[in-house]
Image (spheres, rainbow, N blue to C red):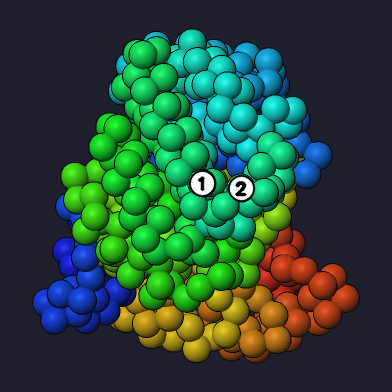
């Protein structure tokens, strides 16, 4: 596991520009003292189309997150459905015996859900979650659109927006107090659709739940692609000014490919808890990528997240297998090809390892290697051969490159190590190749 991060890691583990840590640049941010990684794979990962996990599979994912990645906080789906309660209890049993303190929360959404859409259903769900050994995250409508959408299901469409806002605050306080009576120590809220909320109501709702004693106020963008990252920063700053003693969290969606950027912008506004998921799994286009977010928090911002980054790729591969999801080869940081470079220029300056690669792949448990295609050349070829313990005489390099190109022209893929050895042996002769080692 790496020890250096941020400025200390520059030119050792990463090629991050020192300008990231210039005092005048950092002064533009409202960074918190620490950031907590809240993994939501066991909630959003279960919302991938066609995915229905078993309780054993949920426990296995929890084991990977806790023992391999060292996550400090987990979120699951709430306990309104019997199957969810079974899964919560199974994971809670594992956590009780795992030897570590892990914060937990389960999403309610109950007073916005079928069949009753009311406070009583929410309070029942909060109690179920507490009985399962988890903390609760209480979903609340923060935008007028969400308030009116829920009001229609309650036959309250004739209510004024002022009355609907007042009711939401009353429901929030009642649910928080109910959770306290059930002995919960982790009581959080999720403000849904916060980007489109009325600014004054957003602050009023924040003050109400903070006064009731929540641990975290999570701002949920409810879709992503609704604002530039800068607005996240400014809204988080505004809420933090209103409730400085209460931690803020962010839940961002990747609908238009901006989830990580907006989550980091929230951190620049004072956000302390970031919801992430392994490989960004979730419904639609997914959510905030665990690996990408932790890398940037550690090396671009300098936070010690406590996450074992060196276990990241193996964990991402295994969880992808459990969820029956392909891990794209080009997935940043953890994909098979994340650090595969074909253009020979990328291999011709070995004395500058971060010129074309921002970091050492080993940080996240991955590896770099030369790739082969139309832009392959002698530098990458020799690096690849040396890694396999193969020597290629200089006068044979052009012939090997031509054979490589000819072979890939009809294979349409890179050669396996065995195929590469066989090709080199056919051109150089096995004795000649071995002699160059």
Q: Does residue 318 appear anywhere in the picture?
A: no
- Quadrant position of the N terminus in the picture: top left
Bin the neighbour count of mark 2 within 10 Å (Cα to Cα): few under 14, some 14-19, many 20 and up.
few
Q: Which residue has dot 1 on it?
A: 163
Residue shown at 73% from the left, 31% from the top: 114
Asked if residue 292 is positioned above or below residue 89 in the image, the reply reads: below
Q: Position of residue 252 (x, y in %)?
A: 51, 57
The quadrant where residue 43 appears:
top right
Can residue 51 be seen here? The reply is yes
Q: Position of residue 259 (x, y in %)?
A: 52, 62
> Marks 1 and 2, how far apart in space?
6 Å
Badge 1 density bin: few <14, some 14–19, many ≥20, Cα 10 Å: few
Q: Nearer the viewer, residue 19 or 376?
A: 19
Residue at the image point whose x is 43% and y is 52% from the top: 219
Measured from the top left, where is residue 289 in percent x and y? 51, 55
Residue on which the image places disc 2: 159
């Amino acid at each position: 596991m790496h020890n250096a991060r941020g400025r200390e890691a520059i030119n050792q583990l990463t090629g991050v520009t020192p300008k990231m840590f210039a005092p005048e640049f950092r002064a533009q941010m409202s960074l918190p003292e620490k950031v907590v990684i809240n993994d939501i794979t066991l909630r959003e990962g279960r919302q991938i189309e066609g995915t229905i996990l078993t309780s054993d599979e949920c426990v296995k994912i929890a084991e990977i997150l806790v023992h391999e990645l060292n996550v400090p906080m987990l979120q699951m789906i709430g306990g309104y459905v019997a199957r969810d309660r079974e899964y919560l209890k199974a994971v809670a049993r594992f956590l009780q015996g795992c030897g570590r303190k892990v914060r937990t929360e389960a999403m309610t959404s109950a007073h916005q859900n079928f069949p009753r859409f009311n406070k009583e259903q929410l309070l029942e769900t909060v109690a179920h979650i507490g009985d399962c050994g988890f903390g609760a995250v209480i979903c609340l409508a923060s935008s007028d659109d969400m308030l009116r959408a829920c009001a229609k299901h309650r036959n309250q469409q004739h209510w004024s927006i002022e009355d609907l806002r007042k009711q939401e605050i009353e429901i929030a306080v009642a649910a928080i107090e109910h959770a306290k009576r059930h002995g919960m120590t982790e009581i959080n809220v999720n403000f849904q659709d916060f980007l489109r909320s009325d600014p004054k109501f957003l602050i009023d709702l924040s003050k109400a739940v903070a006064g009731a004693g929540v641990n975290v106020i999570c701002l949920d963008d409810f879709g992503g692609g609704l604002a530039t990252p800068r607005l996240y920063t400014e809204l988080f700053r505004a809420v933090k000014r209103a409730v400085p003693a209460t931690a803020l969290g962010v839940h961002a969606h990747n609908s238009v490919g901006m989830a990580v950027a907006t989550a980091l912008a929230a951190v620049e506004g004072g956000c302390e808890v970031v919801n992430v998921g392994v490989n960004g799994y979730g419904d639609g286009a997914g959510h905030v990528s665990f690996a990408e977010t932790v890398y940037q928090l550690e090396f671009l911002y300098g936070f010690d997240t406590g996450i074992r980054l060196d276990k990241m790729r193996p964990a991402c591969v295994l969880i992808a297998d459990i969820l029956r999801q392909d891990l794209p080869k080009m997935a940043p940081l953890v994909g098979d090809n994340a650090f595969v470079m074909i253009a020979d220029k990328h291999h011709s300056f070995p004395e500058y390892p971060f010129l074309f690669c921002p970091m050492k792949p080993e940080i996240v448990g991955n590896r770099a290697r030369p790739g082969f295609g139309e832009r392959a050349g002698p530098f990458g070829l020799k690096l690849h051969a040396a890694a396999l313990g193969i020597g290629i005489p200089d006068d044979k390099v052009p012939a090997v490159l031509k054979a490589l190109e000819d072979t890939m022209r009809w294979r349409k893929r890179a050669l396996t190590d065995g195929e590469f050895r066989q090709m080199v042996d056919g051109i150089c002769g096995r004795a000649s190749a071995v002699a160059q080692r």
